[in-house]
Image (spheres, rainbow, N blue to C red):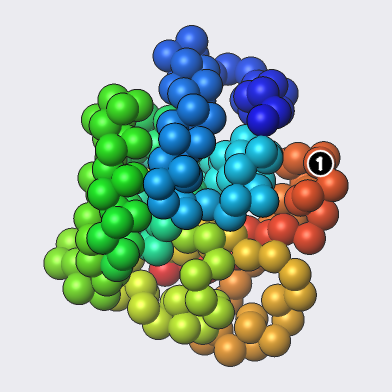
Amino acid sequence: MESPSCIRKYFPDFTPAQVAQLQQLEPLYRCWNERLNLISRKDVDMLYERHVLHSLAIAKAAQLADGAKILDVGTGGGFPGIPLSIALPQCRFTLVDSIGKKVAAVREIAHALRLSNVQVVQARAETLPQKFDFVVSRAVADLPTFAGWVWSKIATGGHSSIPNGILYLKGGDLTGELKGVAQKAVVIAISDFFDEAFFETKKIVYIKR
């Protein structure tokens, strides 16, 4: 397992408490991955680069306002929601997934990290009653399908550095998917923020509500 130095390289202003939480991720995910395949077993040795830093690209792409409400759809093993909740303690996170075992594990991870700004829910996003400032996710569906699921869950306006909307982590050639999205999408290259080779084809798609 690589050290969190790849995180500190890009986020030097993290507090000692945040650094300590990041350091806890490695043993927590190793423990849970032995019981449940939370993340790809071939990726577990690259947790900080391929999961944590990848998630934190969203924090580079936008400055989210204090009190912003963020919904992580299809959180799986807790990405991008867990790393973002460490980086942005002033924001409120709701992590949802339909798989009960994963929800239970992520809930325990959030509890172990003492993340008071995180709620983990077993549900489908479209069934949630509340609205959010941003919806984040990591490649759970093609873009048109995903936007259809969550569009009604996003409040208009907002006080962050960008208006409320979707911040979606996706890789590869997105040309075909973007043609199917009714709203205007902005594609942000994660390689603009991080210089590791892993991020050369990784993108954030921002869709304004």
Decide: is 90 above or below 118. above
Residue farthest to the left, as pictured: 129
Percent position of residue 75, x then y: 40, 56
Residue indicated by mark 1: 196
User: How dense is the environment of label 1, judged by Cα within 10 Å: few (below 14), some, or many (20 and up)?
Assistant: few
Decide: is 162 above or below 187. above
Asked where in the image residue 154 lies, by quadrant, the reply is bottom left
Q: Amino acid at mark 1?
A: Glu
Identify the element where label 1 is drawn: loop
Decide: is 175 above or below 67. below
Residue 158 visible in the snapshot: no
Asked where in the image residue 202 lies, by quadrant, the reply is bottom right
For the point 44% across and 77% down, the residue is 147
Percent position of residue 82, x then y: 42, 40
Q: Return the residue nearer the eye: 18 or 35.
A: 35
For the point 50% across and 36% down, the residue is 30
Horizontal side, residue 66 vs residue 60: left or right = left
Horizontal side, residue 14 vs residue 120: left or right = right
The N terminus lies in quadrant: top right
Percent position of residue 155, x then y: 29, 63
Horizontal side, residue 16 vs residue 115: left or right = right
Decide: is 92 above or below 97. above
Residue farthest to the top, as pictured: 16
Percent position of residue 197, x then y: 84, 47
